[in-house]
Image (cartoon, helix red, strand yellow):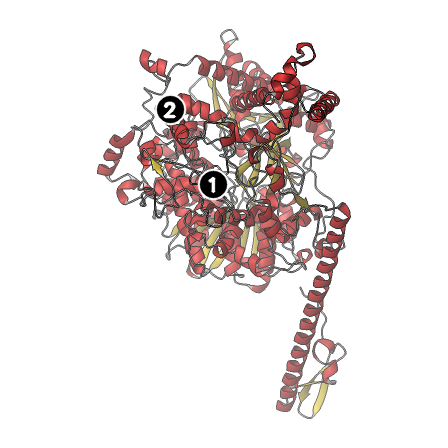
Amino acid sequence: MDRDYGRYRERDRGGRDYDRDRGGRDHDRDRDFRGHHDRDSRDSRDGGGRGRDGDRDRDRDRDVGYGGDRNDWNDRSDRNGRNESDPHFKRRRLNFNRSVRDDGGGGGGGSSSRNGRFDRGRPPRDDYSSRSATPRGDRNRRDATPTQEEFGATGEEGVSAEDEKALDRDWYTGDEFGHTFGDEDHNPFGSYDDTSWADKERQEQQMLEKKTGRFDRVNPRTLQKQKDVDAWETNRMLTSGVAQRRDMGADFGDDEEATRVHLLVHNLRPPFLDGKTIFTKQLEPVPAVRDFQSDMAVFSRKGSKVVRERRQQRERQRAAKDATNAAGTTLGNLMGVRGDNDDDSALPLAGEEEEAKKSKSGAHPDAAGAKGSNKFAEHMKKNEGASSFSQSKSLREQREYLPAFAVREDLMRVIRDNQVIIVVGETGSGKTTQLTQFLYEDGYGHVGMIGCTQPRRVAAMSVAKRVSEEMEVKLGSTVGYAIRFEDCTSKDTVIKYVTDGVLLRESLNEPDLDRYSCIIMDEAHERALNTDVLLGLFKKILQRRRDIKLIVTSATMNSKRFADFFGGAPEFVIPGRTFPVDVMFHRTPVEDYVDQAVQQVLAIHVSMGPGDILVFMTGQEDVEVTCELVRERLDTLKDPPKLSILPMYSQMPADLQAKIFDKAAPGVRKCIVATNIAETSLTVDGIMYVVDPGYSKLKVYNPRMGMDTLQITPISQANSSQRSGRAGRTGPGKAFRLFTEKAFKDELYLQTIPEIQRTNLSNTILLIKSLGVKDLLDFDFMDPPPQDTITTSLFDLWALGSLDNLGELTSLGRKMNAFPMDPPLAKLLIMAETYRCSEEMVTIVSMLSVPNVFYRPKERQEESDAAREKFFVPESDHLTYLHVYTQWKANGYLDSWCTRHFLHAKSLRRAKEVREQLVDIMKMQKMPMTSCGTDWDVLRKCICSGYYHQAAKVRGIGEYINLRTSVTVQLHPTSALYGLGFLPDYVVYHELILTSKEYMSTVTAVDPRWLAELGGVFYSVKEKGYSAREKRVIETDFNRRMEIESQMARDKLRQDEQRRAEAEREARAVQQSADAGSGTIIGGGSGAHSGAGGAAAKKIVVHGAVRKPVAKKRGRGF
């Protein structure tokens, strides 16, 4: 239509405002294409914050022609006139190889260099990739590949010593398989303030509303009326000849909709999950709380009000400080304003000076060619975390002081006389450290290793260190430990501390654990997932091996259950020093448990006799807020007694944890605020008062989201009794329970729900299947998992291809078991062999197996965010991790390079160690190491092959919806895909993390056709004219075909079993004939009645000339 049409409309009908109407008509078209010409919000920040770099970006874009006419914004041809449809057209690709120079030609994928910088170009695509498959940000963005000039910034302060320790704690105290649960201890987004990101999201929303006009706020009826009026006016003017229609060109055509691919999602299930098969004795799900409508359950879901208020107050203070802080800005630099951390002596030296000093001393890992080890054994200080008692006594005196040492002879006599024994003892009795030494001194180490399992990695390492010091041997020689990705043992190791998950994987190669002469299952009362599986395995191993000893250690809470599980095994109680405890319940339900606990602490401190106080809280944030409130309210009192407030949680440094064991000064009372780590894991002398709110954090599986989350839930009666017992260790004490006696009886479980009944079992079931267990109903669980949990886990394994339509393990599933990680990551490594990208994929998987590599200090968040964006690869967060590792490798694995670019050098070194171990496993599996170079599409397709069951489709601005579960998930602002201006239609993600919203972690854009190709069970491409009836027909045919294949497979298995049984009968008949010929034993009856089918047959023993029938004794058997 003619361009004068708009001016004509302005003059028509008395100057009526038609711009608004014209805007409404063009609104849909502009909305479809706004992703191609909107400036990215981050570009404005980068351009303004980086000065000349931003100008250089604009100059480059002006040279290329991206900033000109609107027709250029959607140009799909390159500058040489080649079009994407040309089969010889090759996209410019990111060059990860720093040794290849980009000089306009040759081998770096065709990238051109301008002023020492790379032009990113557009991302590569598959031959049939749609425009919607690959995100294309504004071309004014910074390059995706930072060059050495960008990486050559001046040295800055590095990671603080405290953050280094926190990183170690995240690594050693985290989940065995590296899962993140979204709490303040495990959340990788924890350093990112939700309020600041919410403000940025709000600003971007406002910008989009400005660009798209005001019609988003008009109701649909009015908007449709305006569109009808526009269509009528257009028709009138075209009919009268006032306006003429003209071809608007391809740029304004609806080519986006023409090439957009839509997927159909099929809700299909394998035949073995048809609901007819029972996999467990626990048919009903086990809820996390006893009564969801009870007062304690409601209060736990609401959380503490004072904690929320304190969190909001901190966020407001931080925002006000950031708004008024001039440090780091241009004005601040001119005025000489220095940041808070400029004079912090705790920070390491910056840049090359630190590098030179550490290299001279030989202590820096760079000096050894990046071979510095991150093993716990080489970095743990000898006396770190030592209390005053341990520092004043020798190791021999400390051993003799333990209660277990006093009953050594009685304990060893019981162990010699029994194959299984249950050892019951309170925390601090010496079970963990002394039992292994007793067995070693008694000679059990001569015939095999003495193994001791721990539910946590940090416990396995620290206990091994302690025992090595007591035995005066080097850690890793006679005494060692083994955790996932870290083995500190040798051929001389006799005492081995392992996590239960490591021992479970050892049972794959050694079903009977022949290398061990004795196994100690420590902390069994915690009922960890792998512990329960090991208990079921040991019940079978003990039947096959009569020479192995099993010792199960437990607290007093549920020792009888273990004894009954092993057929009445004897219990040996290590006597402890206990005193009576007076338990007092609250009169009314307590809504805010933190506020009430603070009041109770002050009441005890002011009005009760001497004695230290122990307060239990749910997590680190609750602990810190409680300490702050006690301190603040104590200061408001007039001349209060002295109180030493000490926090205690697992993420604290060991030296600070040790302070709680030190005796307080005369006239000073200690108040220890701790998580449930103080419930069974440690004992503090002097505790006379216990304040128990009645809550703890519990890992619970959320089937709706398909993830494990940490929830605040009421504790069990056994846990409450255990907490109360902490007050009776050194004298009579009092326990204050902040809940009513009625709630204790009616709202709390008797025992804590075992982890196996409230967590995802995909890993466990895959392992059990690999051990040869065909029917899960036959596996001896102490507490069977719920049917729904097993069904969900079996479905996930079937979706990944680990199980066939009969529920049997496939060859892919057997290969996946060789890798000590979650099934999706293991499948990535296996599929990398098919796509010939093993080198790159093993790097990505190793980066996903370590804590977050990006460092974001609170005082320099903007700088760290800018440094992080340099590494962004717009297609994928997985490729961003690959880019980080490749650049680190290209820069010689230098710590100073990590310091300058806000990266955790320790995490990268751990990723390097994990990568080396994974490469060794792949070589053992005879999987060749191949590389795909810079072909991103191959990498993204391989990533899709492992995550197609976790795919999501775009729904709104930064919002997606899971294709299978229809759960709304968010794209986190830290993702490389966030803020591109054009969101990909389909993505896959590594896992979900629940904070204020359900965020996707580590996202990659994929082509929908890849999902249909790789996940054909779930997805298919929707063609034109496709109806719902055809979808039902396809699903019906698929189900019928799957049932036929399953029936054929079952018939084949039945025939194989029949042939095997016939072969066994024939072999038995031949053997019986041979025995009869030798005159020893004669089998009665014909071959048809002999062997397994000869139940009526009798054995006849020959005594000279007389034959006497021998009656077969019937026994229970196993």
Front-most of residues 783 and 430: 783
Residue 123 - label: 1
Q: Amino acid at mark 1?
A: Pro
Query: Which quadrant is home to the N terminus?
Result: top right
122 vs 689: above or below: below
Q: Residue 1110 vs residue 175: left or right?
A: right
Rendered residue at 63%/25% (across/down) = 27
Q: Position of residue 602 (x, y in %)?
A: 56, 16
The answer to which image quadrant residue 328 occupies is: top left
Q: Secondary structure at mark 1?
A: loop
Front-most of residues 379 and 91: 91
The residue that label 2 is drawn on is 55
Q: Position of residue 1027 (x, y in %)?
A: 75, 46
The tag earlier along the polypeptide, 1 or 2, is 2
Q: Residue 297 vs residue 842: left or right?
A: right
Rendered residue at 73%/77% (across/down) = 1093
The answer to which image quadrant residue 276 occupies is: bottom right
Q: CA distance from mark 1 to mark 2?
A: 23 Å
Q: Residue 813 vs residue 102: left or right?
A: right
Front-most of residues 146 and 224: 224
Count the marks.
2
